[in-house]
Image: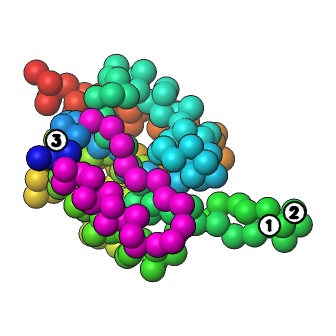
Amino acid sequence: MKKLEYLTLKEECFNLKNEKMVFGEGNLNAKIVLVGEAPGAKEIEKGKPFVGQAGKYLDEFINILEIKREDIYITNTVKIRPYKFNEKTGRKVNRPPKKEEINEFKPILLKEIELIHPDIVVSLGNYSLKTISGKKNHAIGQVHGSPIKLANCILFPLYHPAAVIYNRNLKDTYYQDLQKLKAVLLQFTE
């Protein structure tokens, strides 16, 4: 039944736009759902979330938390690649999702989370944090590493792995937040 609902939701999503998308994937009975910002070039190419540069951090994330990729569900706030053209190279480069793109995919994301029904949703960065919490005033710099109780689960905000790539000063904070998340996860597995 859950698999059929998942496939129906995926089809609904793919019918929204006539462009390549990356839908969430993983364990449909996962206790943990990871929500990123949007797919990048590698994700669009492979049709899977978190396989590009941020995917390397995902592997590290999984190792630190001592979980397996097959035990989690991974998705993004926006299912298309938001891009712009680099004026110098003429190539596509990633850009933050626009409000319209977020609003278009928000119902899909919320249905995904409802379908999986996890104990913990880990938001990676500001876009997923604000979309899932429904609070526009939330900022990742203020609430990272602090569990937020939602109606049906715990929201655990983390910096997006790309933020750590671009700002090495966040690396220690990111690892401290992962240790906090690990402690929260232990509460649900005992």
Please report the residue visible at 48 percent of the width from the left and 34 percent of the height from the top.
58
* 3D distance between C-alphas at marks 2 and 3: 44 Å
Q: Residue 71: x and y, percent? A: 28, 29
Q: Establish if 107 lies above or below 174.
A: below
**Dot label at residue 114:** none
Q: Which residue is mark 3?
A: 119
What label sits on residue 89 in the rendered view? 2
Q: How many marks?
A: 3
Do labels 2 and 1 touch, CB within 8 Å? yes
Q: Amino acid at mark 2?
A: Thr
Q: Which residues are magenta?
A: 4-27
> Which mark is first along the chain, 3 or 2?
2
Q: Residue furthest bottom?
A: 100
Query: In the figure, 18 relative to 112: above or below?
Result: below
Give the mark toward the camera: 1 or 3. 1
Classify mark 2: residues with Cα within 10 Å, few (<14), some (14-19) or many (20+): few
Q: Nearer the viewer, residue 143 or 22?
A: 22
Residue at 33% across, 61% down: 11
Callout 1 environment at 10 Å: few (<14), some (14 to 19), or many (20+)? few
Report the residue that reaches farthest toward the right.
Answer: 88
Q: Name the disc covering residue 86, or none.
A: 1
Q: CA distance from mark 2 to mark 1?
A: 5 Å
User: Is 148 colored magenta in this rendering?
Assistant: no
Q: Position of residue 164 (x, y in %)?
A: 58, 42
SS at badge 1: loop
Task: Say which of marks 2 and 3 sits in front.
Answer: 2
Q: Tell me: 187 left or right of 46.
A: left
Estimate the spatial distance between the alpha carbons at disc 1 and disc 3, rounded to whole Å: 41 Å
Up-down: is 91 above or below 22?
below
Q: Is residue 37 visible?
A: no
Q: Nearer the viewer, residue 134 or 7?
A: 7
